[in-house]
Image (cartoon, helix red, strand yellow):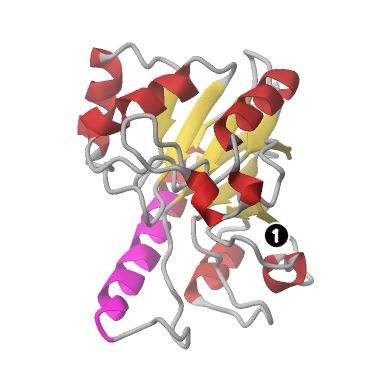
Amino acid sequence: MALFALADPHLGYGVRKPMAIFGPQWADHDRRLEENWLAGVRMEDTVLIPGDISWAMNLDEALPDLRFLNQLPGRKILSRGNHDYWWSSLAKMEQYCRDNQLDSISFLRNNSVPVSDEWLVCGTRGWLLPGDADFHAADDKIYNREIGRLRLSLDAAARLRQPGQKLVVCLHYPPSTREFHPTPFTELMDTYTVDHCLYGHIHGLPPSYACFNPPGRIRYHLVSADYLGFKPLRL
């Protein structure tokens, strides 16, 4: 069993949202994603998708995108991004998957999901960081709520974690700045001895802007789909 990751697929089968308007790298991105996925991911593998999954505004609009993911090989574990307006409660999303036979999809929301004896996954969306040019007073509440949600997810992981099991945190937003100043997100991950942190959200920027790996146990991975060339990254 292998573990892969790819964020920001930005699917829009249920709505009209052509991604090519964001640059030529997005032309036919769903077809390229499918081809790369089929070439590398097996049925016994797991793919983590940390946010910006669908442009849909509700679950019914997201259904064609979820069906697209469901028919691809492997188990898929989804977490929320800033554009996932269709996202709902864990119970509602799980019931929706049962009702629509989406049997290869599960979700991260204040919980932790065992993948195998080797891997355990948890995470949350994250948010803009204080000091960001777009961070305003109204963002402070969301920022602190996301810190709390990461703690809940890490607590859930701590109750399940077995000796030797690697812990992966899925975030949508980067957990720190490009200079890697410590934040409550990075400090929590240090406290809970996280092994890998995945994040997306960053598009069209040089790798040096967002790909940081400071000294320490945690390995950080930018897994935005366009950065990866729409090819799931094997951890």
Left or right relative to 179: residue 154: left
Query: Magenta residues, as a range?
Result: 137-153
Left or right of 153? Residue 118 is right
Report if residue 187 lies within the magenta region: no
Residue 189 location, x and y as percent? 56, 62
Residue positioned 58% across, 19% down in the render: 74
Q: Quadrant of residue 42?
A: top right
Q: Quadrant of the C terminus?
A: top right
The percent coordinates of residue 83 (x first, y second) are 36, 53
Q: Position of residue 199 (x, y in %)?
A: 57, 55
Direction from residue 165 to residue 87 in the image, left or right: left
Residue under pointer 1: 218
Q: Is residue 177 above or below residue 219?
A: below
Q: Is residue 13 left or right of residue 44?
A: left
What secondary structure prevails in the magenta region?
Answer: helix
Rendering coords of residue 23 (x, y %): 59, 54
Q: Which element carries disc 1, helix, strand or loop?
A: loop
Q: Residue at x 28, y 15 (%)?
A: 98
Q: Reply above or below: 160 against 136.
A: above
Give the quadrant of residue 54: top left
